[in-house]
């Protein structure tokens, strides 16, 4: 009976899932920006509306049982209810809410449409493919055309930093985050499975790390360190991983030029020419906290961190700390809702892990995908202390993956018990 219901749901949502994959490719590759005619047609918005309508019409038997979904809804409702109390309601309506709704679609569509392992494979591998392209494109342009995209201070001078491609929207730190996001999946889905997959992993790894070095992103380097620290802790082959880690660190720092080495050493040392910008991050967090305290309970309004920092802090940048960004925009009330949301994502992966440990699920993909997502979550949590992202896609795609993985694990366990 359960299998029959799933087959009906898969059939009823097949077209919507196909459009969702098209939307993901368009979103990450910025297809409307590359093809202006599609931008003029508002292609992404049309896709979202059609997918949403198809889901509503599908009338699937799959119920929204995940507690994660209610906190996404709470964030949306609270952002609207707080409009009369925030500093800039116009900015909330014009920018904050549209961006949050766009990001939240990743949760809603993933949870509603990723109903079986095959679809999970498709979305994970598509995520890997498009984000790998986002890394390779600027690297290729850098090698062939001298493309960089941005600069940063180095003492009294400025030096080049590699950012996303000409059509992308990520700076150097954003490109480093893209690299850090795909590394756990390559490690678990490719690094330990079959000769060809291992070959792809070990061929791509130096390319990804070399591109990371060109971004001059200190937070990105720390994110990579976090990824492999968590991989090390979860591994049963600690000696081999530790040895490879030491060799990798020696090779990585040995390949850096003087400017790159100075930039990364400023993470630990104040006796570098790049230490001033590192110290600026600390003072910036203090200023962000002061801006949040101007309106600590309800915040200045969704999407107004940069606006609030300019008006009350004297600098036009959003907070480079997710939690301070949320506090500035949504106040303590919104911060509590967001913390509970992240907590439910974590709990979802814990439940999935227990379900798989207590069953004889033989799917190699599910067993490889789960630790990749857990490491990705750990990295993103620690990266959040050096980046903004309340209305970015990652936390909502996280939520969708967590809810979908939990359902898949429970479904697999139930199917085994019935058989």
Image (cartoon, rainbow, N blue to C red):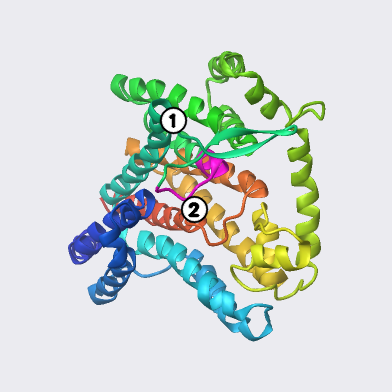
Image position, residue 195 (x, y; %): 31, 19
Magenta stretch encompasses residue 134: no
Q: Quadrant of the N terminus?
A: bottom left
Mark 2–mark 1 Cα distance, whole angstroms, equals 27 Å
> Is residue 295 shown to the viewer in this render?
yes
Q: Nearer the viewer, residue 213 or 146?
A: 146
Say which residue label 2 marks: 394
Give the percent coordinates (x, y) of residue 413: 36, 50
In the image, what residue occupies the spot 55% across and 28% down? 213
Q: Secondary structure at mark 1?
A: helix
Pointer 1: residues within 10 angstroms few (<14), some, or many (20+)?
some
Judging depth in this view, the residue of 396 and 117 nearest the camera is 396
Locate residue 124 relative to residue 179 in the image: left or right.
left
The one of 154 and 128 positioned closer to us in this rendering: 154
Element on which disc 2 rests: helix
Q: Quadrant of residue 390?
A: bottom right
Instruction: Check if mark 2's residue and mark 1's residue have beta carbons within 8 Å.
Output: no
Does 270 sit above or below residue 341? above
Look at 59% across and 38% down and name the residue there.
151
Of callouts 2 and 1, which one flags the residue occurring earlier in the amino acid sequence? 1
- Residue 231 visible in the current orientation: no
Q: Is residue 169 magenta?
A: yes
Disc nearest the viewer among 2 and 1: 1
Question: Which mark, residue 142?
Answer: 1
Left of 373 or right of it: where is 35?
left
Q: Which mark is residue 227?
A: none
Residue 396 x %, y %: 48, 59
The correct choice, above or below, for 109 with respect to 402 in the image is: below
User: Where does the magenta region start and end?
Assistant: 167-177
Q: Position of residue 326 (x, y in %)?
A: 65, 63
Picture layout, residue 286 above or below residue 302: above
């Amino acid at each position: 009976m359960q299998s029959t219901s799933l087959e009906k749901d898969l059939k009823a949502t097949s077209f919507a899932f196909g459009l969702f994959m098209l939307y993901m490719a368009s979103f990450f590759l910025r297809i409307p920006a590359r093809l202006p005619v599609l931008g003029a047609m508002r292609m992404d918005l049309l896709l979202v509306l059609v997918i949403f309508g198809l889901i509503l019409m599908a009338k699937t038997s799959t119920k929204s049982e995940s507690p994660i979904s209610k906190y996404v809804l709470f964030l949306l409702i609270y952002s609207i209810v707080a409009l009369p109390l925030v500093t800039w309601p116009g900015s909330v309506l014009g920018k904050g809410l549209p961006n949050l709704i766009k990001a939240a679609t990743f949760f809603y569509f993933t949870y509603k449409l990723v109903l079986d392992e095959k679809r999970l494979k498709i979305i994970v591998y598509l995520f890997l493919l498009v984000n790998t392209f986002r890394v390779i494109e600027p690297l290729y342009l850098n090698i062939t055309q001298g493309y960089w995209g941005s600069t940063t201070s180095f003492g009294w001078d400025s030096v080049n930093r590699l950012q996303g491609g000409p059509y992308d929207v990520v700076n150097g730190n954003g490109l480093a985050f893209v690299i850090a996001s795909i590394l756990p999946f390559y490690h678990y889905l490719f690094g330990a499975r079959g000769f060809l997959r291992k070959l792809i992993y070990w061929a791509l790894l130096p390319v990804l790390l070399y591109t990371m070095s060109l971004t001059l992103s200190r937070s990105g380097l720390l994110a990579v360190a976090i990824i492999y620290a968590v991989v090390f802790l979860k591994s049963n082959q600690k000696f081999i991983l530790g040895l490879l880690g030491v060799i990798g660190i020696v090779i990585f720092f040995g390949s850096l030029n003087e400017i790159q080495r100075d930039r990364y050493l400023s993470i630990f040392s104040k006796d570098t020419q790049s230490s001033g910008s590192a110290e600026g991050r600390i003072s910036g967090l203090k200023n962000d906290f002061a801006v949040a305290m101007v309106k600590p309970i309800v915040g200045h309004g969704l999407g107004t961190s940069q606006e609030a920092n300019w008006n009350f802090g004297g600098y036009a940048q959003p907070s480079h700390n997710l939690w301070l960004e949320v506090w500035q925009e949504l106040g303590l009330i919104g911060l509590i809702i967001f913390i509970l949301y992240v907590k439910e994502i974590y709990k979802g992966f814990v439940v999935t892990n227990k379900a798989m440990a207590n069953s004889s699920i033989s799917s190699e993909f599910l067993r490889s995908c789960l630790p990749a997502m857990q490491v990705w979550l750990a990295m993103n949590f620690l990266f959040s202390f050096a980046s903004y992202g309340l209305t970015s896609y990652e936390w909502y795609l996280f939520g969708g993956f967590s809810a979908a993985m939990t359902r898949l694990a429970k479904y697999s366990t139930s199917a085994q018990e019935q058989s």
